[in-house]
Amino acid sequence: MPVYHYLLLNNSTIEEGIDLINNVKVRTGAKTKLIERLEDKRREKIKHKDKKQEDILLAILCMNDDTIYNHKEYIKLIVYNIFNNK
């Protein structure tokens, strides 16, 4: 979809793209469909991010005690970032 290309070129977020499209005056269903697709894409990104974070936490839980101890500062940083970016 070319809209994603133009959003990337403009360094715009999906939310900014939706706002921009909402300000365009048209009388067709294409505007509604485009906004629905952008909102679906936004939901997919959130789901993917949550799944990735879940996988990271699961991997940490599966580590043995020595590995956790040897890498505790790095693990603390990862866990801190996961819980503060939500």
Image (cartoon, helix red, strand yellow):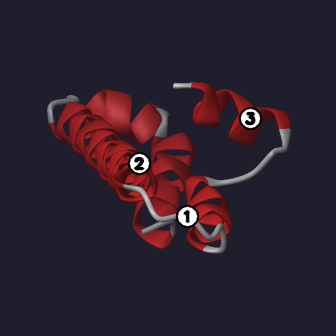
> x, y (%) of residue 19?
61, 71
Count neighbours of disc 1 (C-alpha within 10 A) and say few if under 14, some if 14 to 19, many if 20 or more.
Answer: few
Marks 3/1: CA–CA distance: 19 Å
In terms of depth relative to the viewer, which is nearer, 60 or 20? 20
In terms of depth relative to the viewer, which is nearer, 49 or 45? 45
Q: Which residue is mark 1?
A: 26
Element assignment for label 2: helix
Q: Are marks 3 and 1 in contact (CB under 8 Å)?
A: no
Element assignment for label 3: helix
Q: Are marks 1 and 2 in contact (CB under 8 Å)?
A: yes
Q: Which residue is mark 3?
A: 6
Dot in front, 3 or 1? 1
Residue 42 tag number? none
The quadrant in which residue 64 appears is: top left
Q: Would you place residue 25 above or below residue 31 in this image?
A: below
* Residue name at image x 46 percent, y 45 percent: 75
Q: Earlier in the sequence, mark 3 or mark 1?
A: 3
* Residue name at image x 40 percent, y 67 percent: 83
Element assignment for label 1: loop
> x, y (%) of residue 20?
68, 65
Count neighbours of disc 3 (C-alpha within 10 A) and say few if under 14, some if 14 to 19, many if 20 or more.
Answer: few
Q: Which residue is mark 2?
A: 30
Marks 3/2: CA–CA distance: 17 Å
Marks 1/2: CA–CA distance: 9 Å
* Residue name at image x 26 percent, y 47 percent: 47
Q: Would you place residue 69 above or below residue 79 in this image?
A: above
In terms of depth relative to the viewer, which is nearer, 3 or 84? 3
Question: As shown in the figure, which amino acid type bears the numbered disc 2?
Answer: Ala
